[in-house]
Each structure stands twice: as structure tokens, then as C-alpha cells.
Amino acid sequence: MNKNLVNKILITIGFLFIYRLLAYVPVPGVDTAVIASFFDSHQSDALGLFNMFSGNAVQRLSVISLGIMPYITASIIMELLAATFPTLGQMKKERDGMTKYMQIIRYATIVITLIQAVGVSVGLQSLTGPSGNSAILADHTTFIMLSAVSMLAGTMLLMWIGEQITQSGIGNGISLIIFAGIVSAIPRAIGQTVEMVNTGAMSFLTVIAIVVLVLGTVGIIIYVELGERRVPITYAKKTMMQNQNKRVMNYIPIKVNLAGVIPVIFASAILMFPMTVLGSSTNPTVQAIADFLHPGGYFFNFLTFIFVIFFAFFYASITFNAKDIADNLKRQGGFIPGIRTGDATKEFLNTTASNLTVTGALYLGLVATLPFMIIKGMGVPFFFGGTAVLIVVQVALDTMRKIEAQIYMSKYETLSAVGL
């Protein structure tokens, strides 16, 4: 393993360690014991979902309780606007324009974070512990200001950490932050399960069923994520002679799941945003809407499925550029047997990718919703779903691929340096 790769891995681990430390820094002016007590009785609902993505930061009301989700929500809005308005889409393709584009996302993140932070702060004002003591230790106006500023600082710091990991570390920083948060919540879930078995609240057969379900879900995810359609390529004889000393790929790999883990993260961010804001309202109508969007409900899972399908197609259309592939293939003197070069190749690749995306989108939607519905039917009293397993496995596979790519690149540079 080369020194550069080791440094990237150490940088990534270092930043993730800082992220985990932030989860233990509470918002000023709050009684964490009251928050923890309240969370213990609400971990199977929206709080459980928030807590899963924040790495147990919600139950401590940490400065990073909102996690990286405001940044993701802002990114979704910008992606949708870029797909709608050509000027904004063109901005993304230019180097200077991309800098402005990312700056707009940061500003949008600030606005979204403040809205959510105020919503959480207002909701906490009526929260009391078992003995009647308030969760707020400061006056309400001061607390709203303190919590809004501290949560904004926490989210912006997480955004910066994610960007630093992406630029200087290994893997996608934002995905790795979510990955680390979910993984850090696993020991607590295991401890709760053991305690429930010991007290008789959960049978051992239920635990076995959960383990089988998790392992089965992991197996399905790995199988689909490694699946791809290999479109054969044939090169002209002249091209083969010119590249006889080079490795020429004789197929185009098109993954079954072209969109990766992004659709699941996007869908979760979209659905978590209204729950944060609506949950703080005392209006009966608003409360009824918030209850309707309860993560444990069938409607929530239906919305999750629909959003995952939508973002799978949307993101696949962004990441897979059939025109560029067809143009590059033509320049290299290659072609797909039975398909004319140019527009015909582009249409063939688009059709192939679309057909695979149908399978990939359905797979993402089912894995994100079905395990949770099964777990709910078992009566498990804490939040657990396929979304968590999906993110953990996909991010782990993606990071492993990037580590392997770094190793291969290092070997190639070494061989090139000695003239081989």
C-alpha cells in the first residue's frame, strides 16, 4: 500500500473521528437527561429515523443533531433546478460556474438549517421530563437563538468535513458521514436487543429472524450492486494494431443500479425536512399532517418508495451520458456489433441504461421499504430499516472500489516510472 493512499485513509478516519466527537457536544441551554428520557419512548418513530442518520446525535441534542441532511436537501433543490433551467445546468459544466453553483448550495444550506433548527427549538419548549422539569434551561427566546446558531455551526462544520474528505481523503465525504453515523448507532441497537431478550420483551426467534433478514438484505444488495450489463465492443483492425501494447476494454460496463446510494439519501432528506418543521407545531391540522407522515406508517413508506424510484431515474440520467460514450467510442474506432456508430449507438446505450434503471430503481425502492415493514410486523420497538443497510453496504462497496483504484493507479505509476 503506497504512502499517498495511507495518508488519504488516515485523513478520512481523522475527519470522521472529529465528526463523532461533535455528536457529544450538546446544544447550550438544554437538559440532556430530559431529552434522553423522551427519546427512549419515541425511538421507533421520526426521532428514530433522525437519530439513525445523525449517529445518535439527536438523543443527546448535539450541535450536529440536524446532521448533513440540510446540505443534501439544498443539493437536491439545486440538482432539480439545474435540470429545469439550462443556464443553471450550464453553470455546473464550467469550472468557474461550478464554484458559484457550490456557493449557492452553501447559502441554501444555511437557510434550510435555520428553518429546521428553529422548528426543533420551538418544539422543545413544551417538552418536559417524567418529574415535570422542562427540557429548556434558558428562556425561550435565548434558547431559540442559541440552538439555531449552534446547530447551524454544527451543520456547516459537517459540510466542510464532508468536502475535505472528498477532496483530500478517500471516498465521498457526505456519504461517509452518513455511513459513520449509522454504523455508530449499531452497538446501541445490539445492546437494546440483548436487554429486551433478557427481560423477555423480545423472543430469541425474533432476533434470529432479524439477523436472517439483515444478512439476506446485505446479500441482495451486494449481488445487485456488482451486477452489470456488458455491451460488447469491436475495434477496427488499424485501431487494434495501434493499441496492441495497451489494455483496450472490449465491452462497456453498465451497472444495474446506475444511481448508486444517492436516491435513497435524497428520498430520506426530502421526507425528513417537513417532519422537522411540522413536528414543532401545536396546530391540530398541522399535527395531523405530521402524524400522517409518521415513519412507521404505510404512507411514509409509500412516499419513500416513490421518491426513491424518481431519484433513481433522475440521477441515472445525470451520471450516464450516452452521447459522450458514443462520441468517444467513434473517435477510438470502436463500435457495438450490429449497431451503427453515432446517434444509433447513443440510442442503443440510452435504451439499455433505461431498461437496467427500471430494475435498479425497483430494487432500491423495495430494499428501502420492505425490510422496515417486516421489522414493524415483528413488533421491534426501535427504528430499523433497509435504508440503513442499503447505505452502509453501498458506501462500503464504493469506498472499497476507490481504494482498489488508488492501488491500481499506484502500481501503474510505478511500472511507468521504471519504463515497463
Image: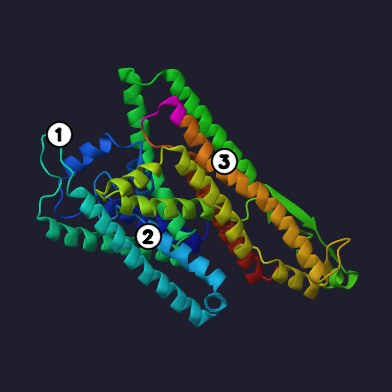
With respect to residue 25, does 148 lie above or below?
Answer: below
Q: Residue furthest front?
A: 285
Residue assigned mark 3: 366
Point out the image quarter for the C terminus.
Answer: bottom right
- The reply to whether the C-beta atoms of the residues labelled 2 and 3 are less than 8 Å apart is no
Determine whether, in the image, residue 134 is placed left or right of residue 51. Answer: left
Q: Amino acid at mark 1?
A: Pro
- The reply to whether the C-beta atoms of the residues labelled 1 and 2 are less than 8 Å apart is no
The span from disc 1 to disc 3 (Cα, nearest Å) is 39 Å
First along the sequence among labels 1 and 2: 2
Q: What label sits on residue 130 in the rendered view? A: 1
Neighbourhood count class around disc 2 (C-alpha, 10 Å): few under 14, some 14–19, many 20 upward: many
Compare residues 200 and 78 and report the one nearer the observer: 78
- Residue 11: tell me if it is visible: yes
Residue drawn at the location 67% of the way across and 67% of the way down:
321
With respect to residue 364, does 87 lie above or below?
Answer: below
